[in-house]
Image: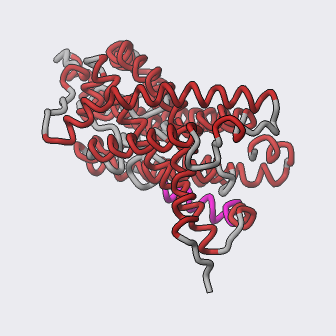
Amino acid sequence: MSPRISSDEALEILIVSMRDAFLAVTVFVAAMILLFSWLQYVTAGKFVDWIRENKEIQPLIGATMGLTPGCGGAIIVMPMYTRGYVTYGTVIATLIATLGDAAFVLIGAVFRDVSFLAPVIAVHLTSFTVAVIWGFAVDRMGVTPSSPLGIIRPNSKSSASLEEEKLDLEERQIIQEMPREAPDGFGYRVLHQGYRVWWVVTAVGLCLAIMLLIWYAQDPEYSPDLVWDITTRDGIVTWVGFVGTLLSIILYISSKNFIRDDTEATIGDKLNSFDETLVHAASETAFVTFWVVVAYLVFEFGMILSGISEADLSNHGAGVGAVAVAAAVGLVPGCGPQIIAISAYVEGIISFPALVANAISQDGDALFPLLVRHKVASIWATIHTTLPAIIVGLIFLWAMGEYPFLRESLQP
């Protein structure tokens, strides 16, 4: 017989998961998303001009835009390709480098445990390096959606480059022409009015989370139970975490983007209005929060109902099969499933090689605008991101088996 969970135990798991998701992830993710959203707001136009003016190094620039946490930079590149402004190799480099919103979960883990710093740097550096190499190789070999295997033409310009030069004369502005969200319905009003309350609760939660980190740093055995009863349902910290997560779920549902958080319309709004930047930073963080809570609940209830321990899960998540599964999950468009995969690494359930495979394979939300505009290109793009994902994941699997110091530094 499988283990049974009482309603009281289930409620306890739900509340604790909501509290932990908000105080351990959401508040730090919110600060980072706001920072990067603001940077995109003030630099997006310059990035577009820069990438168009530097055709010879476009895969390098595309990888840089993809490397920025979130999907905004990668989404901007997709319509540039369909208009002929950038090469296909630039698209591939951008998609390989991006970790989407899952990057925020990884970076947020560093605030909880500094031992995550090395693997976070390593996975971003690996994704960026593979992105640049693979992107330049695609362009060098003349790979296009219509010629997926390519043909080496070192001294000739591709049709995409010629089309790019022709469209260059039109002086189109990608940022200005991106679609905008239309005010529509109750959900839109909830999001555009409720985000202020959400930011207030998040600011309070961030202060509490920082105070707890300071106290734990001073005394690892410190227990805040004496002050706030953090482990009970009646504690202040628990209530802030619970309310913050509940508000995040409300914003998540109101945004109506259930698998992805960013669309061209939301990116267009963010890049043209700082107020909309605040709105969609809240919406993006709420999206991350929802999927982190889902991951927590899946892990907690899954282990209890199956009778499997964390050690058993770690063993299952450390082999060749884990690398293949993680890369396969990366094939799914959108950031939701990827956040669950990245959370599995943070919780110690899958290995670093599996993390790398997922990071390289996944395309975040950026595949959606490409899928709408150029289905063949999007299909081949998923192949071009999955192949290096499996190869590099297996290389890390071998290397960590041969060199224990790698395993110790990359698997907290």
* In the depicted structure, whether residue 354 falls above or below residue 67: below
Determine the residue positioned at 32% across, 35% down.
Answer: 78
User: Closest to the observer: 187 or 68?
Assistant: 187
Q: Which residues are magenta?
A: 316-330
Determine the residue positioned at 19% across, 15% down.
Answer: 171
Q: Main secondary structure of the magenta part?
A: helix
Locate residue 234, reporting x and y percent.
Answer: 56, 46
- Classify residue 98 as left or right of residue 195: right
Whether residue 134 appears in this view of the structure is no
Determine the residue positioned at 80% across, 27% down.
Answer: 218
- Classify residue 178 as left or right of residue 70: left
Locate residue 12, reporting x and y percent.
Answer: 56, 58
The image's colour scheme reads secondary structure
Quarter of the picture containing the C terminus is top right
How many marks the image carries: the answer is: 0
- Residue 318 shown in magenta: yes
User: Closest to the observer: 226 or 183?
Assistant: 226
- Residue 109 shown in magenta: no
Quarter of the picture containing the N terminus is bottom right
Whether residue 107 appears in this view of the structure is yes
User: Closest to the observer: 63 or 116?
Assistant: 116
Determine the residue positioned at 55% across, 53% down.
Answer: 341
The furthest residue to the bottom: 1
Locate residue 405, reporting x and y percent.
Answer: 85, 43
Locate residue 364, reporting x and y percent.
Answer: 42, 43
